[in-house]
Every structure is written in structure tokens, then in C-alpha cells.
Image (spheres, grey):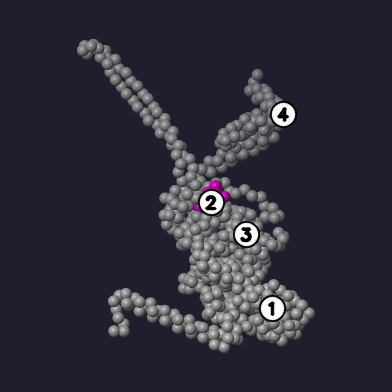
Amino acid sequence: MNEYEALQQDRVKLQQWLHAHGLMELLSEFPQGTKQARALGLMGLGWTLSAAGMGEDAALWDALSIALSAWGASASCKSFLAHLKWPGLFSSELGLQSAEPPIWTPSAHNPHAYLMGYTLDKGTPIQLSGEHLCRHFLAAGMTGVGKTVSSTLLMAQQISMGGGVLWVDGKLDPENMEMFFHLAKWLGRESDVRIVNPANPKLSNTYNFIAQGSPDQVASRILSTLPSTQSNAGSDYYKQAANQGLICVIGAIQWLGLAYNCMDLAILLTHPKALLELDEKINACLHVRSHQHDPSIASFKLFLESCKSSHPLNGKTQIDTRKLRDLFGGVAGRLFVYGSGSCGEVTNTYHSEVDLFEGMRQGQLMYCALPTMGQHLSAQNFGKILLGDLRCAVAKLQALPKASRPDPPFLIWLDEVASYGSANALATPFQQARSAHIALGVGFQEHASVQELGPSFLSTILGNTYNKLLFKPSDPQTAKAWAEMIGRHRVFETSVSTQHSRSKAFDFLGLAWDSKAAQSLSQTHTRREREEYRLSVERLARLDVGQAVLLHGATQLYDLRIPKLSFLPHMRRELGEVVIQRPASTFKPKSRGLEFLKSTDSSSPKDGHARAQEGLFFYKKYEQFLSERVCAEQRLGLAQEELRRAKFQNLGGLHPHA
């Protein structure tokens, strides 16, 4: 038998085996966990088929062998290159091997994907679905390491998808506002931008945060700026009494169908004449519609009676100013701050250009700048009342049918939340905003600053954020807390010890020439198990600027590089300066007072659309009272300052009047 006949016989046997068993059995014989062996086996099979293909069907067998050989070679190269570290941009000192990307299937209900960054060990893009993002996220780290960059990347994708954004900026960086506007304009959504800037009314839309909502919602929104009174029974009593009075007053105003603002409400809570004027409006309307009865009017009448007292000289019944001051002193003072100065130019409006609920439902792009550096107390209170309004808006979205909720999910980014956050206002949205199709994200620097907002607030944030972007930590305590949060894993250590001994033995008195020699060799293998941090404090401190660790679902870790979005100088010049978008207003500038209330008797005051456009205008009627109050507060401040100075001088042994 010559060589050619032997090859033909081998080819026939191979064909019979392939027909009987098939290629799948051949591939299943290779070890499942060894990709290199599988690839090399495919290459060998390809060479075998190439050798056996000499004959009638040589072309077919050659093509099959080439395909299998190429497949095996590519698998071998891919397996080999997977272990290489890419130089340059994809370099990291963490030594972390990223997990596999999150697996999710796009569907008609959830087609959106958000790029979070690129892994540094493989260069793989990590994308989260809208459902993953709705489980909320946080970005923590020291200043200037990439928190705002990561949020800008998410917001740019959200704007390009046609979704809505609310950015509450706790540090009032003009570049952030400009970047936000330029992104919207570049993507063709300039008309959707709304800006709230209490520090600069000329560069702000109007925002009346107490105009929308039921009386108890508005009252809760206002009282959210007050400190917690859970541990003080006396303070809690006065807070609950103020809450009841606010509900009565706001309910009466809404029953009349009159618009109001912060200054109107501050005047009503401090000026007896304004309360009596509101009572006259109610009596005039009741006289026209005597058949209509509302519980809110009865509650207001009872509240008004509780504030009345007899005059000590003439015995006439009057509203006791001292009772109003004791009941609403702190609340009215905060409302007065909101309604005066530059902040008042933004809030003293009856046609609010910013409505959080409508903006979230329509997918608007809203930016709120809080001047926490220059006006810390005012910015802190403004942020708290904004979060209270946000809580009411989320509640309204939850009440909508699923088809009417935001799609893609509405994105909320609370930057530097420790400077204005409130545990009472944010705890519930973190727990329930997912059902309203809202993605809520917070940014802060260290754990200590968030713990000051409440003992359980930090636990609420960490427990209700499915995705955590951890940048370079600002202090060792925060780094240790992150290492504990990322968790530990088991590590096995193997040690080998070798012992070699040699000995010689001689005959008695060492007289013999042949000595006896003995040698021994012993080797001990020890394997020890211990637990260590998946990422230690020292390794977290090595994070670079723009580098973050993504903890997804409390188990999957990714070493990410966050891409930075920016416009070139000539592009910024073409996009221009920030322009405030002013929606059309249908509000009537003048109130017609009691004549308007008497002129219509066909419908309830709540039902008339035109009546809802009427304003209370107390802030214009009582301008003299406001100016006197400002002067009184200034005099009180000067007197308190003089008193503190005198006490300090007396403590120091100084006598200014000597």
C-alpha cells in the first residue's frame, strides 16, 4: 500500500466518524475551562483535515480546514491578549480586575443605556440600563477628582435621549451653569432650560415654591426648613401648632382662588390687619354663596378666634400680635427672608416659570444654583424647601399611570448635598422615587459631612443607592468606610519549607576507613486562609483624578476611567452666553378685589380658571409695614451686637463707660 492509498483510507474513516458522531462531540471532548486547549485542538483538527483533503473533495476539505484553523488561531490570540495590560490611558495602580459588564436586554419599555466609563484593565465600556439607574446612585470623593464630570456625562446622555434633568448645584460654579446651557443648546433643547438662581435674579427664572400643592403639603414644605424637634416636646408642640395655623391660612387663600407668594404669607402670619382683610374677603364671598360650606373656612374661623383677645383699655376684641409672634415667629422670619432682597425678586411672583412637577412630567432641563459660599444660611434653607417641593412632585408622579411617568427616567443630581440636604425631605424619595421612574443621584465629599444631617441619613443613602462611584477619598475615615462597604474576600496563602540534613557515623574509636554517611530531605507545604479587603485603604488612596471604582449591586467592582466632556473655546463662543427662557404668562397683573368675588356666583371659587389668576398682592399693600420691619430688624441686630460687644469687654476687664 502506497502513501496515497493510506491517506485515502484515513479520509474515508474520518468521513465515517464525522457522519456518525459529528463535530459537536469532538468539541465537547475538550476541557470546558481551558480556552487555549480548545483553540489548539481546533487548529490541529484543521491541519488534519487539510492533510486528509487530498483527493476528490480537496477544495471542500481545504476550505473547512482553513476556517477551523483560523477560528482556533483567533481564539488563541484573544485568550492571550486578554491577559495583557494596555499602556497609556488605561493604566491603573489598583491592581483590580473588573467584573463582567452588567447583562441587560434592551426592550420597548427600557431601551436606554447610560455609559458610566471604561474599565482600565480591559478598556470595556460599562453601560447601565435605565432600570439600573432608577435604583439611584452616588458619587463621593474629594473636591476636583471627577464627581461633576461623571454627572455631566450622565446628563449629556439624558439630554440627548430627550429626558429631563434637575441639577441642584451646591457650590454655584458659573462654569457649571454655562456647561449645562451649552449642552442643551448644542443638542437642540435650549427652550427646555429653566434656571433658578436666587443670588442673581437677572439670570434666573421665577420660582414660587409655595404656589402649588394642598395646604398640608405647602405647610410641610415650609416647616421642613426648621430643625428637628423630635427630642424636644416643647418645641414640637409649637411646631405642630404652627403647622395647624399654616394649614388654616393657606386653605382659606386657596378656597378664595387667590394666588400668593412668600411675602404675602409672611405678612398674613405677622400683621393682624392683613388677617382681618382676608377674613373680610371670605365673608364677602360667603355672603354671595351662602349655600356653600367648606371645612377649610370653618378651620380658618376657629383659628382666627383663637388668635383674638380683649384690649386691656377699651375691652374691644382684637387679634393679639403677641400670640401671632409666638406661633409663627420663626416661620414668618424665614418666609420674609425668601421674599426679600435678591431672593425675593425670584420668589415674589404669581406666575412661577418653574414648576417642578410639570417640569419633571414634561422632561424639562432645570438647574438650581445655591450660593452656599456667600449666603450659607439662606442657601441652606432655600435648598431644603426646594427638596420639600421635590418630594411633593415625586408624590404626584407616583399617582400618575405608568404610561404617563417620565420615559426615559427623570434624572436628579444633587451635588454637594451635605451643604443643603435634609434627612426628612430626602429619606422618602430615596425609598420610593424608583416607582415614579426617577433616577436620583447625590454627590458629597466625606461621610462626616453627611452624618451631620441626621444619624440615619447616611445609612439611607448608602442603603438605597444601587450604583456607587467612589473617587479618591478625602480622609482616612471615609476610605476605611468605603473599604468596609466594598467588602472582604478570602485569600489562600501557601508556604513551602525545606529541610536538608546530613550525618556521618564511624566505627568504634574511628579506626575503620569506611565511614557510614546518611542524608535526609524533608519538605512541608502549609496553606493558610485569611480574609482581607477587596480594596484596601492604601489602594483606594492611589485613585487618580478622573478614576473611580464603581460598586454595582454591592458585589460587582469596576475600575473605571471617566471621560470628560468639554467644549473648545471657539465652540463656547459660538454657543454664546446663558439666555433665560421665558414661557408665556397669562397672569393678570391687577387684582379686582371684592368686586370680582361678588360679580361671579355661578361656580365655586376653586373651579373658576380666571379666578386662579388673581393675586393677593399684600406685599404691595403693606409696603410701609415691610420697610418698618426691615428697619426694626436692623435696629434689633445692632442692639444685639452692642450687647455682645459689651459682654465681651466686661469679661476682658474693660470698662467702656469709665
| Gap in angstroms between the C-alphas marked 2 and 3 | 21 Å
The secondary element bearing badge 4 is classed as helix
Give the answer, above or below, for where 611 lies relative to 382. below
- Label 1 close to label 3 by CB (< 8 Å): no
Q: Quadrant of residue 236?
A: bottom right
Residue linked to disc 1: 256
Amino acid marked by disc 2: Leu
Q: Secondary structure at mark 1?
A: helix
Q: Nearer the viewer, mark 1 or mark 2?
A: 1
Q: Nearer the viewer, mark 4 or mark 1?
A: 1
Q: Quadrant of the N terminus?
A: top right
**Of callouts 2 and 3, the N-terminal one:** 3
Q: Which residue appears at 32% of the width and 77% of the height?
A: 650
Q: Earlier in the sequence, mark 1 or mark 3?
A: 1
* Residue drawn at 66 percent across, 85 percent down: 590
Residue interval drawn in magenta: 549-560
Quadrant for the C terminus, please: bottom left
Q: Give the residue pinned by disc 4.
A: 19
Q: Nearer the viewer, mark 2 or mark 4?
A: 2
Residues at discs 4 and 1 in contact (Cβ within 8 Å):
no
In the rendered image, is residue 393 in sight?
Answer: yes
Q: Residues within 10 Å of mark 3 (few under 14, many from 20)?
A: many
Count of numbered circles on the image: 4
Which of the pair 497/292 is nearer the observer? 292
The image shows residue 69 at horizontal and vertical percentages of 61, 36
Q: Amino acid at mark 3?
A: Ala
Residue 433's tag is 3
Residue type at tag 1: Leu
Q: Earlier in the sequence, mark 2 or mark 4?
A: 4
Which residue, given by chain and number where applicable, does mark 2 sit on? 551
